[in-house]
Image (cartoon, rainbow, N blue to C red):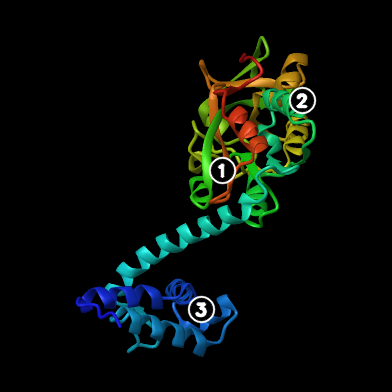
Amino acid sequence: MEVNSNPTTSKKKLLVMKIQLESLSSFIAAADTGSFSAAGRKLKKSQAAISLSIQNLEIDLGFSLFDRDGKYPQLTQQGELFLKDTRQLMSQYTAFIERSKSISNVEQIKLCIGIDPLVCCHKINKIILDFSIAFPLVELKIVQQNSESLAQKLTDKTLDFALGVFSQNVKKHFEHIAAFHLIGSWIVSPSYVESNNLHLDNGVVKIEKSLFNQSRILLSSEIPLTDMDESTLTKQIWYVEDIHTLLSFCRNGLGIAYLPNFVVAHDLEKGSLNKLVFDLEQVESSSSRVSLIYNLGYQKSPAVEWLTNNFSNFKLCDPMSV
């Protein structure tokens, strides 16, 4: 029998072998929920099972993770430090599992992607057309919903990737690639101009900032106001999920809207909508950053690689841009 002359090394090897991923999951759940019973409900286990799992983990580690003297367990200093490392380890493990699952399906023949209608400009349509030529055998399904819904579908693993306007809070849960800038404008209808006695000059409406701040504002919930502070605006802000409904509201004189230029280009050309400026200062160059998001550890097939590269290969989405 071989005897290890270094007991410290032997103990460390034993510690690594004894720690179970299930125990780490129980520990994270207890830390997140604040109690063993709540952790049990989250993981669909009994409180006793969670408690035992954490106790075994503490024995393996050689120190306490929780202070149990109060009504609810509190993380010890060692527990707080260990929690950070555990989260990182579990994140890497999740990415490893997802990547392993997808390896056998790299050459996929079915592809489901999400595109927010708010960002589906003429360049996106051209890329989809080119994709059909480059990958004629791939069965493509395109889901068009708002960015928030697409992110949820990605979490549910019903999409390969999503293209939209996502907040930093959403993007931190996915792998993401910055794509193009989406250019938008403030617009009003001729009937709104007339009823509010606004000044119209060559299809451009001039308005004082103070009057603008007291007007009804129509917004998509997806696009942040890059040049405005929403807190200074009227309380009459309407958030409309569907851009076509928002456009219809604006055409009917319901208020002032902010929409991507590719959505309103035709209306501006035929005069059914007018562009808005503040006094002499034009604000038509506002933009939002579009991003591609996909799950951690997702293994891209050649078809997905082609699409994501092309979606992120141009800088501007605007009818006037080349």
Quadrant housing the N terminus: bottom left
Q: Which residue is at 50% across, 34% downward?
A: 228
* Image-based side of 89 in relation to 223, left or right: left
Q: Mark 3 or mark 2: which comes first in sequence? A: 3
Q: Which mark is residue 250?
A: none
User: Does residue 216 appear in this view?
Assistant: no
Q: Mark 1 or mark 2: which comes first in sequence? A: 2
* Image-based side of 61 in relation to 138, left or right: left
Which residue was labeled with disc 1? Answer: 166
Helix, strand or loop status at disc 2: helix
Which residue was labeled with disc 2? Answer: 133
Can you tell which quarter of the image residue 195 is in? top right
Q: Mark 3 or mark 1: which comes first in sequence? A: 3
Which residue was labeled with disc 3? Answer: 39
- Relative to 9, residue 178 above or below: above
Can you tell which quarter of the image residue 268 is in? top right
Query: Residue 11: x and y, percent?
Result: 28, 78
- Relative to 69, residue 322 above or below: above
Q: Which residue is at 63% across, 31% downward?
A: 306
Helix, strand or loop status at disc 3: helix
Mark 1 or 2: the one toward you: 2
Q: Residue furthest top?
A: 202
Query: Residue 102: x and y, percent?
Result: 62, 51
Q: Which residue is at 56% across, 52% downward?
A: 99
Task: Give the Cα distance between marks 3 and 2.
Answer: 50 Å
